[in-house]
Image (cartoon, rainbow, N blue to C red):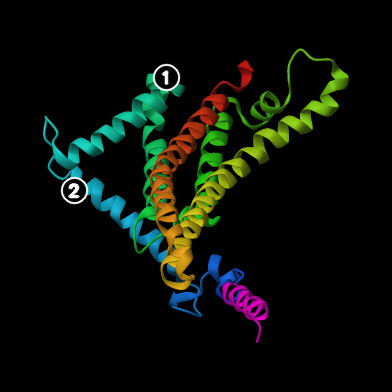
Amino acid sequence: MTVPAARTRERTLSVTTLAAEFHAPSLTDFFPPAVLFEGTPFELDRLMLIRILMTAVLVAVMVLAFRSPKIVPRGLQNVAETGLVFVKEQICEEVLGKESGRRFFPLIATIFFTVLFLNFSGVVPGLNISSNARIGMPLVLAVVAYLAFNYVGIRKYGFLNYMRSSIVVPNVPVALHVLLIPIEFVSTFILRPFTLTVRLMANMLAGHIMLVLFFSATWFFLFDAAAWMKVFSPFSLLAALGFTLFELLVIFLQAYVFALLTAVYISLAQHAADH
């Protein structure tokens, strides 16, 4: 075999080897099979188990933090109180005022810490995914927010007055109502829960995919790639670590945005007649 022919064959084998390492994601990558109670209405997959675990961690942290509270907080109590004060002052009171902020603080704090802890599993080794990366939990949280702000508006104004105040734009020509009323209805009663759900799910799913790609690339360069490709492994590892730090910021921001928008929607419902 001539040298050029040998090189051509070597390149062909290399390409074939690289191609063999890649596989298209299947539905089971996003919807893993059940691991407990399979075939029953209570079957649980890995993502559901992570969701239950992080919920248990959240409850345990709060119970331990406030089991025997001190006047001068220290340790875990100090961390938990800092988070609660942040939600109370920077979200509830900032958007709703002191009286309404105190009223809705339990709801908004629950949403904030639930999103925060469920997101945090995305950077925990061994868990490696936020259970908010699948639509179920973001949808439940969005429905809770949706019911809350509509309940507030209906209770204050009554159903018909609340609907009219929410979808009828004042001081515009009558002919424009044909266009504006459907737009306001869709914006208020359909897009709000939809955007709450998709924003949280899409951000956490995208972060999970990026982390998987970076760490998988590092593994590939170190153990499966040709020798000359191993020089790329430090760069992919640094990118993975850097993106992990960025993901920590995203985890907090998504919890903040979800809780903040819930407070904003409640405030808009409270003052629907003033729009």
- In the figure, 174 relative to 81: above or below? above
Q: Label 1, on which residue?
A: 97
Direction right: furthest residue: 175
- In the figure, 157 relative to 131: above or below? above
Q: Label 2, on which residue?
A: 64
Q: Upstream in the sequence, badge 2 or badge 1?
A: 2
Magenta stretch bounds = 1-18
Q: Single out the mark in the foreground, 2 or 1.
A: 2
Say what secondary structure mark 1 lies in: helix
Residue 12 location, quadrant: bottom right
Q: Which residue is located at x 42 percent, y 24 percent?
A: 100
Direction top: furthest residue: 171
- In the figure, 205 relative to 98: above or below? below
Residue 220 visible in the snapshot: no
- Give the Cα separation between the discs numbered 2 and 1: 30 Å
Give neighbour class at mark 1: few <14, some 14-19, many 20+ (Cα, 10 Å).
Answer: some
Q: What percent of the width, then of the height, locates residue 165?
A: 67, 23
Q: What percent of the width, then of the height, locates residue 28?
A: 55, 71
Say what secondary structure mark 2 lies in: helix
Q: Is residue 12 magenta?
A: yes
Specify whether 24 is left or right of 182. left
Q: Amino acid at mark 2?
A: Leu
Q: Which residue is located at x 45 percent, y 41 percent?
A: 250
Q: What percent of the width, then of the height, locates residue 189?
A: 66, 37
Give neighbour class at mark 2: few <14, some 14-19, many 20+ (Cα, 10 Å).
Answer: few
Q: What percent of the width, then of the height, locates residue 21?
A: 55, 74
Residue 27 location, quadrant: bottom right
Residue 230 visible in the snapshot: yes
Q: Amino acid at mark 1?
A: Gly
Badge 2 vs badge 1, beta-carbon distance below 8 Å = no
Specify whether 151 is left or right of 116. right
Tell me the quarter of the image containing the N terminus.
bottom right
